[in-house]
Amino acid sequence: MNGFWRDSGVALAALVLLLGAPLAFSSPAFEDFIIRLSALALFATSLNLLVGGSGMISFGHGLFYGFGAYAFALLMQRTTLSLASAVLLTLFLAALVALLVGAVCIRLKTIYFAFVTLAIQMLFYSVIISWVSLTGGDQGLQGGIPRRVIAGIDINQQGHLYQFCAVLLVAGLFAMRHITASPFGMTLRMIRDNEARAAFLGIPLWRPKLAIFVLAGVFAALGGILASLFVSGAYPEFADWPFSGQAIFAVMLGGIDSFLGPLAGSAILLALNDIFTRLTEYHGLVQGVVILLFALGLRRGVLDFLRVLPGRGEVASR
Amino acid sequence: MNLEVRHLTKRFGGVAAIDDVTLDFPSGSLSAVIGPNGAGKSTFFNLISGALLPDGGQILVDGEEITGRSQAAIVRRGLGRAFQVAQFFPTLTVRENLMAAVAAHRGQWGDLARRFPPPGARTRADEIAAMLGLTESVDRVAATLSHGDQKLLDIALALALEPKILLLDEPTAGMGPEERARMIDRVQHVWAEQKLTLVFIEHDMEIVFRIAERVAVLCYGRLLAAGTPAAIRADPAVIAAYLGTEAPKP
Ligand SMILES: Nc1ncnc2c1ncn2[C@@H]1O[C@H](COP(=O)(O)OP(=O)(O)OP(=O)(O)O)[C@@H](O)[C@H]1O
Ligand SMILES: [Mg+2]
């Protein structure tokens, strides 16, 4: 259980730092960055539960991010549920959707899995675009998130939103870390490494695969909820494929074999975005070039690159 | 445990890879399956272990039919196997490979309530490694092991399931004479110590006739002969079809 206490310590320290930062220096730009980072990092890390952790390459993970954003914003707008209830109900609904989608996709082999997940995401996207009365169509869900102050937390105030996001980011990452470090997480690595062998060790492959698909969907939806709070609504772009691509970039950039790789990748990606959007209108191009340089130069994500341990060599994985 | 197959048949397209094979492997016996390339030996193991579904016939463990059950269910019934091309988890260390297999065997593969490894798994993993002479390699990443050690790891993974029946598909494939001797030594040792019903596929006749108690000969999917090594060596059909000119010296 050593690892558990070490991770708890790291999580606690990170939380203290994040919550203490506004006391030390007041920077709306920094808070803004952390809020956006929390949404993207939860999304990218949840994607890596599938890609790096289980060898299941999903191209359609953005479905759950978009679903989380829309379901949460709609619940807040159209019901009188408290913030916490709306969050929990959204996560529960996301789990149901993931269960359905997973039941369809889980048995498919690599490339078919990738494209069927993508197809289902595109289907969801077109529903958002065409169901204008519910979702606002391509204009996005307008009208804001109604304020509902509980226990002194007013989510429409940037300082409070920052704290809310910081707590959920750390809690979400801690929970995902625990999943990957558990015997269940090791089972997923066995499946990633060698499905046939795992099957002959008595593991009924579809059960762990479906379970991680649902869990990853729930954490992606959590990211979507934070994004919805940040933009006070929801936009169809959340559920569109280029956004799933962003998460894949973040994973590749940060490191597929390091637990914090997707977090690091998300931070790099957002920072690059912010810098180049200010400097040039060709920021998309610059971003692409930077990613190419990383991919061709390091041949792996930043954290994986920094963490090539002696003895584990090229196949290092943790 | 006793393993028995009756009228087992498997066709790929029109070709019968296993054709009406009936065989009995008594509890605690050490048997070899031999036959030329493409005879259907690996297919035979794939059928027994549930990797392939037979087109006909039955597979029984201690008289209980297991035909058509899932691989996981067959593993739980006490059957373990190693592969012609060693199968293991290449990015994990030898110890992690074995601890993961131990956890799987204990039904902890879905455990979310604790960290890996679960209590006791490490001790058990090191025991299994020692049994196969892998102790010095426990901390090495499996992908970096020598070919021989990878074959041993594959067998070690099967042993983590504490099987009663063990199928080894060419345990000495691709090995030099020295590694081969070490492997056979280990296999015999494990068989005696664990009181297993052990069936192995082997091309090296010298090894087969030295250690096997019973030998089954497959040829184009058909069972050509089965019996003691002495009986097989003397069988005219076997000599004609398989042992041919290079029949081993008596
Ligand atoms: N999954 C499969 N699909 C189609 N044909 C197959 C399949 N597996 C095996 N075969 C065919 O069945 C026959 C028997 O193959 P098998 O691998 O069982 O032989 P073997 O006795 O193990 O040979 P070797 O000594 O080379 O390992 C071969 O002709 C092979 O091509
Ligand atoms: Mg074979």
Image: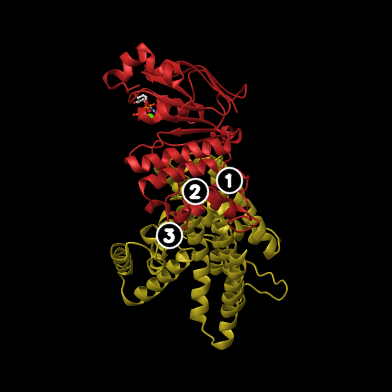
Q: Amino acid at mark 3?
A: Ile
Left or right: A36, with B206 as reference point: right
* Residue A214 image position (x, y, % from top left): 57, 50
The chain coloured red is B
Whether tag 2 and tag 1 are in contact, CB under 8 A, the answer is yes
Chain letter for mark 1, please: B
Label 1: how many Cα within 10 Å (few below 14, some 14–19, many 20+): many
Residue at 51% x, 54% y is: B96
- What mark, if any, has residue A190 been given in the picture? 2
In the image, A219 versus B98, the foreground residue is: B98
Q: Quadrant of residue B233?
A: top left
In the image, B192 versus B59, the foreground residue is: B192
The verdict on a common chain for dots 3 and 2 is: yes
Write down which quadrant ligand 1 falls in.
top left
Residue at 30% x, 63% y is: A292
Q: Amino acid at mark 2?
A: Met
Chain A pictured colour: yellow
In the image, A291 versus B190, the foreground residue is: B190
Residue at 37% x, 76% y is: A275
Helix, strand or loop at label 3? It is: loop
The verdict on a common chain for dots 1 and 3 is: no
Q: Amino acid at mark 1?
A: Ala
Tag 3 residue: A256
Chain letter for mark 2, please: A
The answer to whether the beta carbon of the residue marked 2 is less than 8 Å from any atom of ligand 1 is: no
* Residue B1 image position (x, y, % from top left): 60, 28
